[in-house]
Amino acid sequence: MIAFIMRLKSRAHFTLAPEPGMRDATFLGTNVRLRARARRRLAVVIGAFVLAYIALGVRLVQYGLSEPLQSAAIGAGAHTVASRPNILDRNGLLLATDLNTVSLYAEPRRIIDADEVVEKLALVVPNLDWRETHRRLRSDSAFQWLRRQLTPKQQADILALGLPGIGFRPEKRRFYPGGATAAHIVGHVNVDNQGLAGMERYLDQQGLADLRAAGLTDDTRLEPIRLSIDLRVQNIVREVVAKAMTDYEAEAAGAVILDVETGEVLAMASVPDYDPNEPSRRLADGTVDKEYEKGWFNRISNATFEMGSTFKSFTLAMGLDEGKITLNSVVDASRPIRMGGFTIRDFKGKNRALSIPEVFQYSSNIGTAAVADMVGIEGHQQFLTRLGLLSKLETEMPGVATPTQPRTWKKINSVTISFGHGVATTPLQTAVAAAALMNGGYLVQPTFLPRSRDDAQAFATRVLKEKTSADMRYLYDWNGQKGSGRNAQVEGFHVGGKTGTADKVINGRYAKNINFNAFVAAFPMDKPRYIVLSIIDAPHTGENGGRTAASTAAPMIRAIIRRVAPLLGVQPHFGEAEGERRLVDY
């Protein structure tokens, strides 16, 4: 059986085995098919790689030709920061300009490790809010600002970190070379270069904001804006008021210089103030420094005060203009006035009849009230309205405060207003009204832009007779030589003016031991060219220990005029008889 099976296998093997030639042909056919299949697979692979490289190349070309800031991530949160014009003083000195800077942004969807990014950025970016930054990096948005307006060094340090998903956007940053010197005049902008205060805000209100909205200021070089202020004079005024606030231990101080003929504001300072390069500050705990932001408050134009005895200038001018008194008139100031439950007294009164120059020299409340009574309530209100003391001041400066007055004027109101209580005005409009007393009787609205005398006269309004203005120049000069104005006198420049010491109003009541002091001055008194008004709020001391305007506000005027008069081109005139001769000539 076994032998039979072996024979069958041997026969079957012999039968199925091909001839040698057939075996070679079969092998060759198989190799050909395998090689063809391999070539087809290789061609497919090569084709796939070629297509992939072509697609990658096309995308790279697209990215290369497109604007870098047009990506979806930046487009989702970016906006245009427009250019602003340079701001110059009257002599062409730079007050404000734009600087090119960059801001840091993130594309959260590309951030790999938010914790790492925050830790590394904190090494470069000061006062980085870790929690807020981490929240932004973990958000689902395509774009998040991280820090605006970096310095070049900060940008370089962040680039060296090599963080994916972090980028920079070119922007504009407003720079104020003088810092706080003219802060309340120039104002400041926000992080988007939009004007928030002062003349910066005025520019936006005059159409710059509309140009920005229309995209016409992105890279446009705008013509510079020239202001009326003299930076040299402005710097001196700010130094004087800052020193006075410190020396007299006061809450605040301020001053303004006005051209009596053109209405140009040559300098205006109010302290405390702030640096417009850093309008806000944060404390160590990250909260906003509210005390620092109090410096935004401009007490010369954005606040109203009862201006005290400076108002006696307007009361006597009213009596002179209405023909109720002359410089030779005499009024009875021998006893207090009792009216409506109030008693009107003089501070260090003479208790006798006074001439009009003496009423001004001794700052007699009783004598001034008598003049107001001669004119009457209606005439008094109309006169102050004509001088612009009861209505909002018209000028370019935004935020000008509106004066306050009694809703209904009664006799007691007219009496107290005659010596500066009961009506609150801005110091700036008090200076403007005083300019009308000195310039021949014309009310010229103030301006922070250059203005010629011809332009000023084109819209000036006569509010006083020429004779009244001459009489008021006499009274100012008289008080500068013989009265409280002596503490403001600068030899050679003949300063005249009027002090004002008012009890400060706190919570609707007069504080007996807290004063608001002012001095309104004109110089040179032979032909006044400038008004200088100073204020000091709640001084605790003054020259020779006094707290009145004569010991605080008047010395401020002296310090200002002594330094600015030569810069303003005022020539000094010396000679002891000069002042007496002027009084006779009047």
Image (cartoon, rainbow, N blue to C red):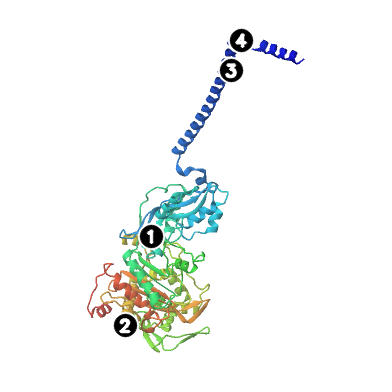
Mark closer to the observer (2, 1): 1
Disc 2/disc 1 C-alpha distance (Å): 44 Å
What amino acid does circle 2 point to? Lys
Q: Viewed as shown, does residue 76 lie left or right of 155?
A: right
In the picture of the structure, the residue carrying the numbered disc 4 is 19
Q: Splitting the image into 4 quarters, where does residue 535 fall?
A: bottom left
Q: Earlier in the sequence, mark 2 or mark 3?
A: 3
Q: Earlier in the sequence, mark 2 or mark 4?
A: 4
The answer to whether the residues at label 4 and label 1 have Cβ atoms under 8 Å apart is no
Element marked by disc 1: loop
- Which quadrant of the rendered structure holds the C terminus? bottom left
Q: Splitting the image into 4 quarters, where does residue 578 fall?
A: bottom left
Disc 3 crowd, CA 10 A, few/some/many (<14, 14-19, 20+): few
In the picture of the structure, the residue carrying the numbered disc 1 is 176
Mark closer to the observer (3, 4): 4
- Can residue 100 be seen in the rendering of this structure? yes
Q: Viewed as shown, does residue 574 lie left or right of 159?
A: left
What amino acid does circle 4 point to? Glu
Q: At which x and y percent is residue 362? A: 37, 83
What amino acid does circle 3 point to? Thr
Disc 4 crowd, CA 10 A, few/some/many (<14, 14-19, 20+): few
